[in-house]
Amino acid sequence: MIMKKIGLFYSFASKKTAKIAGIVHNAFSGEDVQLINVDEVKKENFLEFENLIIGVPTWFDGELPNYWDELLPALEEIDFSKKRIAIFGLGDQKGYAENFCDAIGIMVDFFEEKGAMIVGKIPLDGYTFEGSKAVRDGQFMGLPLDQENQARLTNGRIEQWVVNLKKEFV
Ligand SMILES: Cc1cc2nc3c(=O)[nH]c(=O)nc-3n(C[C@H](O)[C@H](O)[C@H](O)COP(=O)(O)O)c2cc1C
């Protein structure tokens, strides 16, 4: 093992997101990745890790799912300043072209405000959409995955992302 343990936070009840989380977990084989269900999470769970991965689909035309929206206020008091956070998002670049994976951007804004270092940024190549809060300075601030339109690219995208995360995590 080369890194400190990693906390992978997502809703176990969110079907597609949970499947993707399993693929991310496998891609880290050999590392200590702990799966945390945000439906039952406690504030303390976030304090345990210096490396965090957040999985979040975008719902409601560019918004967080309810369970994340309701959880974030409880995290307001946490100091994330020594933490590295990587975010993967699920979205639909055809059906919601104006709001593709916006939830990644919403999460980035929240955790940056709390001092976190965002890792796992990727280029825009290979995606077609109109607008996304996940984009800043010409790149995605996390990893967008599109099971509706580009499911067969997902495994390769995750492989590449994890190769990079292994360099960016501590
Ligand atoms: C009602 C509804 C609204 C959605 N809104 C968005 C959106 O604004 N942007 C986006 O990229 N994807 C959007 N999606 C697509 C979902 O993010 C995508 O289907 C995702 O895989 C769902 O993951 P989950 O099953 O884990 O919740 C929406 C899907 C539904 C059903």
Image (cartoon, helix red, strand yellow):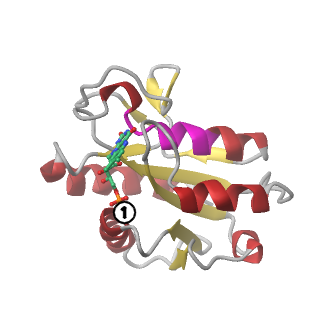
Q: Is residue 10 above or below residue 86?
A: below
Q: How many marks?
A: 1
Q: Tell me if 64 is positioned left or right of 124 in this view.
A: right
Q: Which residue is mark 1?
A: 17
Q: Residue drawn at (71%, 41%), measured in percent from left and top? A: 112
Q: Is residue 106 magenta?
A: yes
Q: Tell me if 90 is positioned left or right of 64 in this view.
A: left
Magenta residue span: 100-108
For mark 1, does the 10 Å Cα neighbourhood hold few (<14), some (14 to 19), or many (20 or more) residues?
A: many
Q: Residue drawn at (53%, 72%), measured in percent from left and top? A: 2
Q: Is mark 1 within 8 Å of ligand 1?
A: yes
User: What type of secondary structure mainly makes up the magenta span?
Assistant: helix
Q: Which three-letter amino acid code belongs to the residue tagged 1?
A: Thr
Query: Secondary structure beneath disc 1?
Result: helix
- Residue 107 lies in quadrant: top right
- Residue 78 lies in quadrant: bottom right
Q: Is residue 43 above or below residue 60?
A: below
Residue at the extreme left: 152
Q: Tell me if 11 is positioned left or right of 91 in this view.
A: right
The quarter of the rendered structure image containing the C terminus is bottom right
Residue 119 picture location, percent across and down: 56, 46
Q: Residue drawn at (41%, 74%), measured in percent from left and top? A: 13
